[in-house]
Image (tube, grey):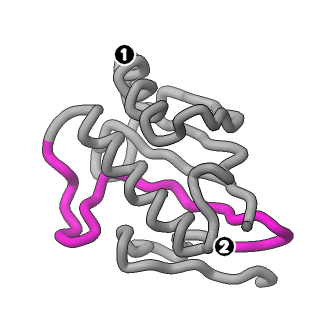
Amino acid sequence: MSGKIVSTDDAPGAIGPYSQAVMANGFVFLSGQIPLDPATGQIVEGGIADQTRRVLENLKAVVEAAGSGLDKVVKTTVYLSDMNNFAEMNGIYAEYLGDHRPARATVEVARLPKDVLIEIDMIAMCR
């Protein structure tokens, strides 16, 4: 594979045949993160707000391990198990991304790994 594999202990490790992220052609492509606490490997307790924060903290750790940052994100995809959680997720998402407005798709899915409420993946520019 061409591209540099990105890995950090500050986010949950890949649990399958994939990488936390890959840097290629000036971009870093981050795999989807679910609300796993990297210290314990357990799903965080609480609802969509707590799970969204954990997911974004995980993504922040990975994008920073690639030498980039949330301010360099150009595209995200948000997967929700229930679209009724959109407004609350969106508020937390805005806290993390501030005035930065990457392209985004949000979809409701039938089921996510470990029956979590949310998964997010990202594409960012390398610094």
The single residue placed furthest to the front in the displayed view is 99
Q: Can you give x and y, in whole percent of width and height, for residue 57 in the image?
A: 38, 55
The residue pinned by badge 1 equals 84
Residue sitting at 70 percent across and 83 percent down? 4
Q: Is residue 36 left or right of residue 1?
A: left
Q: Quadrant of residue 11?
A: bottom left
Q: Identify the amino acid type marked 2.
A: Val
The single residue placed furthest to the right in the displayed view is 25
Q: Nearer the viewer, residue 43 or 63?
A: 63
Which image quadrant: the C terminus? bottom right
Q: Identify the amino acid type marked 1.
A: Asn
Q: Is residue 41 above or below residue 83?
A: below
Q: Can you give x and y, in whole percent of width and height, for residue 56 in the image?
A: 42, 49
Which image quadrant: the N terminus? bottom right
Q: Which residues are magenta?
A: 23-45
Residue sitting at 21 percent across and 72 percent down? 39
Q: Is residue 54 above or below residue 101?
A: below
Is disc 2 surrounded by few (<14), some (14 to 19) or many (20+) residues within 10 Å?
A: many
Residue sitting at 19 percent across and 61 percent down? 42
Q: Is residue 71 magenta?
A: no
Q: Label 1's element?
A: helix
Is disc 1 surrounded by few (<14), some (14 to 19) or many (20+) residues within 10 Å?
A: few
Q: Which mark is residue 116?
A: none
Q: Can you give x and y, in whole percent of width and height, for residue 18 in the image?
A: 55, 73
The residue pinned by badge 2 equals 22
Q: Examine the residues drawn in magenta and state their main secondary structure.
A: loop
Cα distance in 3D space between marks 1 and 2: 32 Å
Q: Is residue 29 magenta?
A: yes
Q: Is residue 57 left or right of residue 100?
A: left
